Image (cartoon, helix red, strand yellow):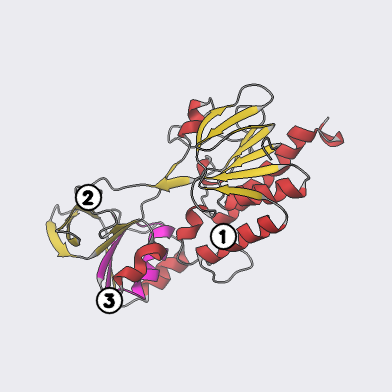
Amino acid sequence: MENPELLIIGAGAAGLAAGLYGVRSGLQTLVLEEKLAGGTTLDAPLVENYLGFTKISGLDLVQNFAAHAKEVGLKINEFESVINLNLKGDNKTVKTNKATYEAKAIIIASGSHYRQIGVVGENEFRGRGVSYCGICDGPLFKGKRVAVVGGGNSALITALYLADLASEVKVVHRRDAFRAEDALVKGLEQKKNVDVLFNTEVKEIKGDKLVSRMIVVNAKSGESREMPIEGIFVQVGEFPNSQIAKEAGVEVDADGYIKIDIRQQTNIPGVFAAGDVTDHPVKQVGVAAGQGATAAIEAYGYIRRPYYRM
């Protein structure tokens, strides 16, 4: 499949759903993924709000997605990074670190990457006590003191997961209330080894070879204190992976998210977008999968021009 009809960039929930619908529609479909299939859902310790699964790890969920997509014949090229897009004309050109493809339609489902807090020590201790993935690194901190930075769903899910592993969990949130689902907030309240620090920010991460302490500041009182800590899990959101698309002429908003209409169309005919890279306000795995399905159906209509679209 050197030149598929439909080429999808990204194999997270949106990309895999799009691939599934693309193949089932009869399109020659190829998915390119720079890492392993699964996207950021892979990093979720526990998913409790995806219909059909009361509790499932993010890893298991996306493995189910990928297995289903491959079963219907979807081709997924992992560890193949897109480095350039030419979206002008009827055929779109996609250049990767391994090959160059032409496709009649493109779906950009490249997702997002983790946002940093930008403090002294964060980069220095990345992988040596600073982590952005609870399920990846949590088991390394069994019986230790850890902190989770953030106040949204991802932060609280991570804190709940770590509470069953670590001896002590500090949740550091710069505001005076969480912006997470009520069920997660209530779950956190039941954990006796979790201490929440509202109106607080991490100002510096310190240590020798590994993280051993952090400096936090109370935003209201201005009080600064140093706290012993062995692991810091940063969960403060993501940035969209949209730079290559933007350089190719795809319109993005002020925060870099790709602008889409209700049909997942971008400003360029034949180019669609789905999932966390888009400007849709809800960043959830269920929403991403739905957007991927919509994008593939619209791409089919664009490519094949069925009677109802003529």
Distance of mark 2 from mark 1, alpha carbons?
A: 31 Å
248 versus 255 height, above or below = above
* x, y percent for residue 46: 48, 67
Which mark sits nearer the N-terminus, 2 or 3? 2
Q: Residue at x 83, y 35 (%)?
A: 306
Q: Which residues fall within the magenta stretch?
A: 145-173
- Mark 3 or mark 1, which is nearer the start of the sequence? 1
Mark 3 = which residue?
143
* Residue type pointed to by label 1: Val
Q: Mark 2 — residue? A: 124
Whether residue 171 sits left or right of residue 3 in the image: it is: left
Which x, y percent locates residue 37?
A: 54, 53
Identify residue type, mark 3.
Gly
Q: How many marks?
A: 3
Spatial separation of the CA atoms under disc 1 and disc 3? 29 Å
Front-lying residue, 224 or 8: 8
Eyeballing the image, is 184 above or below 253?
below
Name the quarter where the N terminus is drawn: top right
Q: Is residue 16 left or right of residue 183?
A: right
Q: Check disc 1 and report the residue beneath it.
A: 62
Q: Residue 182 at x, y = what percent?
A: 45, 65
Nearest to the observer: residue 86 or residue 190: 86
Q: Which mark is residue 73?
A: none
Alpha-carbon distance for marks 2 and 3?
24 Å
Neighbor class of circle 3 (other Cα within 10 Å; few <14, some 14-19, many 20+) is: some
Image position of 218 (left or right of 81): left
Few, some or many residues within 10 Å of mark 1 (<14, 14–19, 20+):
many
Where does residue 257 sit, x and y in percent of width and height? 49, 37
